[in-house]
């Protein structure tokens, strides 16, 4: 086994234990392997070990890395987990299979037009700024219900869930519990929450997707 495969097995084991502790099925949690700053050879290690779901923060980096990998592994599923600029929306719709960072009205409108133009409708998560941090992307909690309604009813986006990145200096469980409650209130089945430092907590609190980078790939370059 490669080092990447060893790390993958360990993360999967921890997800399974956390899920079982919460009375959940491990298969109900999707591991998104976040490969930002790591080259395609590292992604290929995990692909060869059987993993298929990956996440990237930047459209340009994903364009450089993933088309060839997708050609070799047609069942590869690629998530955009970083902030999306409207001028990159066309490229994002073309390349990504899931967009996890819808966070403002203008972006929702642009994505809707690009999906219509491309005839391709990748599922979307709405990013929520649960910590209300000025420097962080995401819709504010108080504005979420109205934004979900607008995405669904006005823009006709395929919204499937919510995503958050808790403040680094706060207890993540509080933010995970809040995100799950907001998702349930809006009839959304999926919540993307938890990263390398706290994905087990996220699983215990109902995460359907966890975004794990350094625990799989090591420190970023």
Image (tube, grey):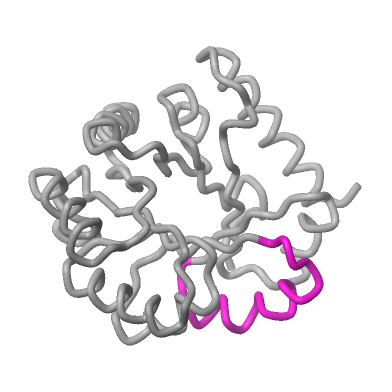
Q: Quadrant of residue 69?
A: bottom right
Quadrant for the C terminus, please: bottom right
Q: Is residue 205 above or below residue 61?
A: above
**Is residue 76 shown left or right of residue 41?**
left
Q: Residue at x 48, y 73 (%)?
A: 120
Instruction: Pick out the residue farthest to the right.
Output: 1
Q: Residue at x 36, y 53 (%)?
A: 125
The secondary structure that dominates the magenta segment is helix
Q: Quadrant of residue 206?
A: top left
**Is residue 119 shown left or right of residue 135?**
right
In the image, 101 versus 36, the foreground residue is 101
Q: Residue at x 61, y 84 (%)?
A: 64
Give the image location of residue 8, x and y in percent: 73, 43
Give the image location of residue 85, x and y in percent: 31, 78
**Quick check: is 63 in the magenta stretch?**
yes
**Is residue 118 shown left or right of residue 187?**
right
**Quick check: is 12 in the magenta stretch?**
no
Give the image location of residue 101, x and y in percent: 35, 61
Q: Residue at x 57, y 82 (%)?
A: 63
Which residues are drawn in magenta?
A: 57-76
In the image, 10 versus 155, the foreground residue is 155
Give the image location of residue 67, x and y in percent: 67, 79
- For the image, the number of numbered tags is 0
Q: Quadrant of residue 150?
A: bottom left
Q: Is residue 51 above or below residue 24?
A: below
């Amino acid at each position: 086994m490669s080092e990447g495969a060893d790390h993958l097995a360990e993360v999967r084991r921890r997800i399974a234990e956390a899920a079982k502790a919460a009375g959940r099925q491990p298969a109900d949690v999707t591991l998104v392997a976040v490969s930002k700053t790591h080259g395609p050879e590292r992604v290929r290690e995990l692909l060869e070990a059987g993993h298929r779901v990956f996440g990237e923060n930047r459209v340009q980096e994903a364009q450089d890395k993933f088309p060839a990998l997708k050609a070799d592994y047609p069942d590869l599923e690629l998530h955009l987990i970083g902030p999306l600029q409207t001028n990159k929306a066309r490229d994002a719709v073309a390349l990504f299979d899931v967009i996890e960072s819808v966070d403002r009205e203008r972006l929702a409108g642009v994505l809707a037009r690009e999906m219509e133009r491309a005839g391709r409708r990748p599922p979307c998560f709405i990013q929520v700024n649960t910590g209300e941090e000025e420097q962080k992307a995401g819709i504010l909690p108080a504005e979420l219900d109205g934004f979900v309604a607008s995405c669904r009813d006005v823009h006709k986006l395929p919204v499937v869930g919510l995503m958050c990145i808790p403040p680094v200096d706060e207890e993540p469980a509080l933010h995970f519990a809040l995100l799950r409650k907001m998702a349930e209130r809006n009839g959304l089945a999926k919540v993307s929450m938890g990263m390398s430092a706290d994905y087990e907590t996220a699983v215990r609190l109902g995460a359907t997707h966890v975004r794990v980078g350094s625990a799989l790939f090591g420190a970023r370059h």
